[in-house]
Structures are given as C-alpha cells and as structure tokens.
C-alpha cells in the first residue's frame, strides 16, 4: 500500500542523511524500524550505527548478537546479500544500546580531568542516584553518547532510536535543561570560589545565610552539603557539557539530519504521533518521513466489493453438485461463508486504518515522505526478516 | 505475591505498562466502574501529556468541548454528573505544596519558590520532580471528608511508562541511601510505608498479548517481586482478539485447500486459496495471542482479558462496560 514515491524517497533519506532520529509512540515497532533502516543503509554500502534504547534481548537476537550494551558491536551483515549495485568497501553495521548508568560512567571516564576527579564523581551519592535512577537524565546521556559516536565513530549514517512519545522530545530540550542545571547563577550560588571551605561558610560569607537556612529546612542540611559537592565536581565539566550539547543540537537541526516519525494506524497511536509531530513543529524540527508500521493485513485478493455473497458460488465451483454428498457440500458452503465474512471484516479494518492514516497525513508538510508497512504473519526474528522490512520501507 | 483483597478496596492503585498498551483507557474504565459502585475515584496523572483530558473531556463535541473543564493540579469532576475526578500533578504546584508543608507559612513558601535561583535549582536538581510528586500523592491519600472517611477511594495513578513504576518504587530506597536524616528523611520513610502497605497500595500491570510487551511485563514482574515489597493486585491484558473463525471453519481449511487445488475453475481456485491463506494467517495470529495470554496467566495473578477494539478516530468507548469487564475478569481470575 505504500506508494512507490514514498519508498523511493525513503531510500534516498537512508542513502543521503548522516543522522536519522526515530521518534514515535510505544508499541508500534519503532526500534525494529530503526534497526531495519540501519541495516538497509548498510546493505546499500554505508557504514551505519544504530543507537537503540530498547533493552529487550529480542533485538540483540534479531541482529545476530549475543547482547547489546554501551559498546558499539558489529552486526554480521555479511550473512546477507548486499543490495544490487551497492559499494562494498564501507558497507558495515554497528549497534549499541544506551544504558544510562554505563553511559554516564563512560562519559565521566572520558571527560574527567584525572583519576582523582573521576573517583570523586563516581563516589558522590547524588551522582550515583542521578545516573542510575532518574528518567530525566536519560536525554543528557543520550546526547553525550550520540556526540561521542558522531565524533569518534567515522559513520556515514547514525540511526538514533528514542524513548516512547512523551520523553522523546527531551532529547531536544535536554540542552536547555542541562544549561539550567549547570546554570552559572545556580552553580555560583553554591560555589562562590574554589577555596576549599564548606558550603555553609561560603554562603554565610556572601550573606546567603537566610537562604541556606531555608534550603536546609526544606531539604535537610546534609543534602545541601551533598548537593554542593555534586555541583563542585560537575562545575569543571560544565563548559564541555554545554559545548557538546550545542554541537549535538546543531547536528540535529542540520540539513543532513532527519526526524522519522513511526506510528501504527491505530487511533490511540495516531493521537500520540500527532502530539509528537506538533511538539517537533514547536521546536522547529521538521518531520522528514512518517512510517505507518504494521498498518494493514495483507490480502492476496484486494476486494473491491463485499465477498460474503461469493461463498455460494465458490462452494458450487469447488464442490460441484453430483460429485459430492450433501453433507460435504453443506460443510464447504458454511466454511466458505465464514471465510468470506472474515475477508470482509479484514477489508473493512484495513480501509478504516487507511482513512485514519489519510486524515493524519493532511497535517503533514508536502515534502514529508509517507511509508506504510503490512503486518507480518510472525514477529521478526532474524537479520533476514529485518532486511525484508528494510526493503519494504524502501519500495 | 498477590493479596486477595478486591482491587477497589485499596486506597492507592498504581497502573504501569509500556507505552501504547492502552493503560490510560484501563485506568479511566476502572474509575468509571468504581463510581458506578458508589465510590469516589480520583485519577491522577503525573504531569505528562494529559490523556484523561482526551478520554473524558475531549470527546464531547462542539460547544461541550469549549465548556469542558481543564484537568489541572486540582481535582475536577470529569463526568457531567460528577462521580469521577481527575487531576494532573503539576511540578510547580506540587513543589509549592511541598514547601508549604515544610515551612508552614505560605508567604515564606512563596518567597522560596519565587526565588529565581532556588527555582532553577529545584527544576534542575535530580529527583526533585519525583519527590514532590510522590509527596503530593501521599497528601491526597491522607485527605478526608467531613465525616472522616477518605476523600478519595480509590486513587488511580496513571504512571508514565514501565521504567517509571520501578523508579517510583525505587525512589524511597535510593533516597534513604542519600538522606540519613532531616525533613526529607521523614517524607521518604512515610512514602516507603505507603507503598509497601499491601492493604493500602497495589500495583496493576497493563499489557498486550504480543511477544514483546509480554516479555517486558514478565521481566517487570520479576524485578518488582524480587526488589520490592509492593503488592501486585492485577494484570490487565488489552486487545485480546476473539477467535477469527468458528471451529468448524478452521477444521475445514485443509479440505477447502485440497478441493480448490483439484478444481478446474481457475478463478474460483485462486479466490478460495487466497481466502484460505488469509484465514490461516488470522488463526495463527489468534493462536499466538492466546499463547501470550497463557504465558501471563502462569504468573497466577488475578488477570482480566479485555476485548480487542478497533477504535477508529471519532469513535466513543463504553468505559463503564469496559471497567466492569476488567473488574469481573479480575475476580474470575482470582477464583
């Protein structure tokens, strides 16, 4: 059902862009689509990286890997035939999973000044809590991970998978929050100078006694001290954070980056997808392509009219009078009646889905590529199934 | 890990599930069913995109939409006849509520939350958002009517995503490590007490009969039961398909194929074979879904199967009927 132009245009995105960000509601197969995109680009001759957030084992298995973690692992694409006419030299695919805790640790390892500084950060209790448990910090680290891959990875294309709908926009807002977090005024409020005196002394000396007392009353004095240390160890990282965040933000808004919205044809998913589409528009990030995944049930006989009436004729055709007994004919007729009814139900369902897709598409910009994929009989299990999905997206 | 206390007798029901499994719909449906049984349900969203606004108020057409109240930080009745309340905890208001609770004087609280530097700090510092939201939940749970009865029964919390539930439950434990004493410690302790009180609080899992969501639900269940004291009060499986064909038709598929292949009528043969292919595809998908349901049922939790609904744009849902079905499903699973 995906029109040819959609598929071709989608293939062009995979062939030309350097960064593709997949966003979409949960449960629509977004991670699988991201992996299929990366795989297709690799088979077309590009060196690609898929950065996923999905911790499910199934994805690693599908990619032919033992597991997925922060490390970029080569996917055995050589098992598959390269696509016709594809250059072989650079064709390769890598995959890594964003594990917030591990990614934080390796980030600190990369950017801390020295071993002592690194240990102080690792040992700070607030760092431990923040890097291991809080959702909001995911976006910071996703961004850092992306930066690292962009700088060090020598990739032709990076496909970034994002968390479901509501948090997906964080990745665009993160630098804002990050700079708030490490806002000069906030940090300076805590750390007036680099002299090793306690926070309270410092604040008292600057006349912040009343404020500190209040803060202590609200959150407890011990936490104020921990917070101060936390800011202190992060202070030196601030400049680097902001610089990298800016670079990633520029990369995400550059011409060679595209946002791909993945949805299904179900109304509940489309509502979430619309929310995302609007959120991206507010942030002046255009959606380059929409994938309506698993949007219809493939039918071998596209029925123009209801088929319920066909049961009788078909029964007579395959079970002619005189050749079979009445019981057999009745059995065949009844079974075919059920089958034709099912066919009509599925046809109606597909049509309703298509109507909702069409309504959704009215809000899309003219340049936005639209692709629709069918529901597979079984869930995708291996690299060749993933390759098939990639081909479907591009034809 | 389950407690045989009927769901609606608990005070705090936490609903969790991967995005896209229809969690908000289940929450709304159970609230409707609770109202029908004469309770005072309050639905709480945690500051994310307001699904309840769409579910309860968005679907009213034309002028009704304009007059519909907005779900905000204070509970509002979301049905024309009252009976179901909803709110969406707002970070700023929850922060203010928390500060008022600590310093007792609103003027001082306003001074604190109005301080630009402190405000930035609160927005940016780790865990502030989660702490003040949990605190708000605790306040709601304690509210009483004039006669001393709980103001809300039950409180249904629509958690954002799978990870969110774990994080919420983990939070008091994590914070205990960071906070040894001080006012926050008291809060953390009372949160721990609330969440682990199996009489008052229970967690409900919402999922779909598909391989990936089921796998995640099983993993979540094991993580929850290994790490936490929290009770798991029920499992809701959404979008469970009905059998696509009657047994007789399924049994006849092979025969139809054989007969079609033997037929001289090429057009009829093609049509019947296509029909058989589609039927097999639908039966396989149905059986796959049933197998997933069975995997979930092996946990032995009270489990409700909810029917598959092809909701298309503009279609309204009979929430009350769905809620009744969810509750009776649980009770059936309980037997």
Image (cartoon, grey):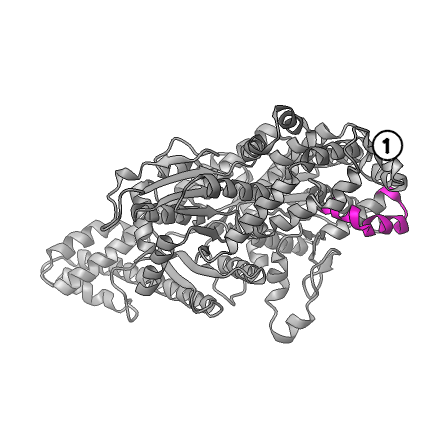
The residue under label 1 is A201
Q: Is residue A379 visible?
A: no
Q: In screen coordinates, is B146 left or right of B269?
A: right
**Majority secondary structure in the magenta region:** helix
**In-image side of A159 versus A319 (left or right):** right
Whether residue B6 sits left or right of residue A257 in the image: it is right
Q: Nearer the viewer, residue B289 or B98?
A: B98
Which segment is the magenta one? B102-123
**Residue A291 higher or lower than B140, as above or below:** below
Q: Is label 1 in a helix, a strand or a loop?
A: helix
Q: Nearer the viewer, residue A134 or A171?
A: A171
**Which quadrant of the figure has residue A349?**
bottom left
User: Where is the N terminus of chain A found, in terms of image quarters?
Assistant: bottom left
Residue A340 place in picture, x, y as percent: 28, 62
For disc 1, the neighbor class at 10 Å (few under 14, some 14 to 19, many from 20) is: few
Residue A46 versus residue B36 in the image, above or below:
above
Q: Quadrant of residue B259?
A: bottom left
Residue B65 horizontal/vertical position (percent): 64, 70
């Amino acid at each position: 059902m995906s029109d040819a132009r959609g598929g071709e245009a989608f293939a062009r995105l995979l062939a030309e862009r350097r960064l593709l960000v997949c966003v979409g509601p949960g449960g629509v197969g977004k991670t699988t689509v991201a992996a299929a995109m990366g795989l297709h680009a690799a088979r077309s001759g590009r060196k690609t990286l898929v950065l996923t957030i999905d911790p499910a084992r199934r994805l690693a298995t599908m990619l032919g890997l033992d597991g997925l973690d922060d490390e970029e692992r080569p996917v055995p694409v050589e098992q598959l035939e390269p696509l016709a006419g594809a250059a072989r030299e650079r064709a390769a695919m890598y995959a890594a999973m964003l594990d917030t805790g591990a990614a934080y640790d390796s980030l600190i390892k990369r950017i801390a000044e020295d071993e002592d500084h690194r240990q102080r950060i690792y040992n700070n209790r607030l760092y431990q809590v923040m890097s291991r448990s809080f959702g909001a910090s995911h976006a910071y680290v996703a961004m850092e991970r992306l930066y690292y891959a962009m700088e060090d990875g020598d990739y032709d294309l990076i496909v970034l998978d994002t968390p479901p709908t509501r948090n997906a926009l964080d990745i665009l807002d993160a630098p804002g929050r990050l700079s708030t977090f490490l806002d000069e005024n906030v940090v300076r409020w805590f750390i007036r100078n680099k002299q090793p005196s306690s926070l309270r002394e410092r604040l008292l000396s600057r006349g912040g006694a009343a404020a500190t007392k209040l803060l202590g009353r609200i959150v407890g004095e011990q936490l104020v001290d921990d917070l101060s240390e936390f800011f202190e160890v992060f202070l030196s990282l601030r400049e680097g954070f902001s610089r990298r965040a800016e670079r990633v933000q520029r990369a995400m808004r550059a011409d060679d980056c595209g946002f791909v919205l993945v949805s299904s044809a179900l109304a509940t998913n489309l509502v979430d997808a619309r929310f995302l589409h609007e959120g991206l528009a507010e942030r002046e990030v255009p959606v380059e392509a929409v994938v309506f995944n698993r949007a219809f049930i493939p039918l071998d006989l596209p029925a123009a009219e209801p088929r319920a009436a066909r049961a009788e004729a078909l029964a007579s055709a395959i079970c002619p009078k005189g050749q079979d007994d009445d019981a057999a004919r009745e059995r065949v007729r009844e079974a075919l009646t059920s089958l034709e009814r099912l066919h009509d139900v599925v046809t109606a369902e597909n049509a309703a889905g298509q109507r909702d897709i069409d309504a959704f598409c009215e809000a899309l910009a003219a340049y936005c590529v639209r692709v629709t994929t069918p529901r597979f009989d079984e869930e995708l299990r291996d690299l060749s199934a993933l390759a098939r999905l990639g081909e479907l997206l591009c034809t | 890990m389950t407690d045989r206390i009927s769901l609606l007798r608990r005070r705090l029901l936490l609903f969790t599930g991967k995005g896209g499994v229809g969690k908000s719909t289940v929450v709304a449906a159970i609230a409707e069913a609770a109202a029908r049984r004469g309770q005072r349900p309050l639905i709480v969203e945690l500051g994310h995109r307001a699904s309840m606004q769409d579910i309860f108020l968005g679907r009213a057409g034309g002028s009704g939409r304009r007059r519909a109240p907005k779900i905000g930080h204070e509970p509002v009745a979301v049905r024309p006849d009252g009976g179901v309340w909803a709110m969406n905890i707002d970070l700023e208001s929850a922060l203010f509520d928390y500060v008022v609770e600590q310093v007792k004087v609103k003027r001082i609280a306003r001074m604190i939350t109005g301080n630009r530097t402190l405000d930035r700090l609160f927005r940016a510092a780790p865990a502030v958002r989660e702490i003040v939201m949990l605190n708000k939940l605790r306040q709601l749970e304690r509210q009483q009517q004039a006669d001393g009865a709980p103001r809300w029964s039950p409180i249904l919390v629509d958690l954002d995503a799978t990870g969110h539930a774990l994080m919420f439950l983990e939070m008091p434990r994590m914070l205990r490590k960071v906070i040894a004493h001080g006012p926050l410690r008291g809060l953390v302790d009372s949160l721990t007490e609330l969440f682990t009180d199996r009489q008052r609080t229970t967690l409900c899992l919402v999922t779909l009969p598909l391989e990936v969501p089921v796998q995640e639900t099983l993993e979540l269940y094991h993580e929850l039961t290994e790490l936490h004291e929290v009770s798991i009060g029920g499992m809701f499986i959404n979008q469970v398909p009905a059998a696509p064909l009657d047994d007789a038709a399924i049994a006849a598929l092979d025969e139809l194929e054989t007969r079609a292949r033997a037929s001289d009528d090429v057009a009829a043969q093609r049509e019947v074979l296509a029909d058989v292919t589609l039927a097999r595809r639908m039966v396989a998908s149905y059986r796959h879904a049933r197998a997933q349901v069975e995997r979930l049922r092996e946990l032995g939790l009270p489990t409700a199967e909810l029917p598959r609904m092809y909701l298309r744009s503009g279609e309204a849902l009979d929430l009350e009927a769905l809620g009744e079905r969810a509750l009776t499903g649980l009770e059936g699973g309980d037997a």
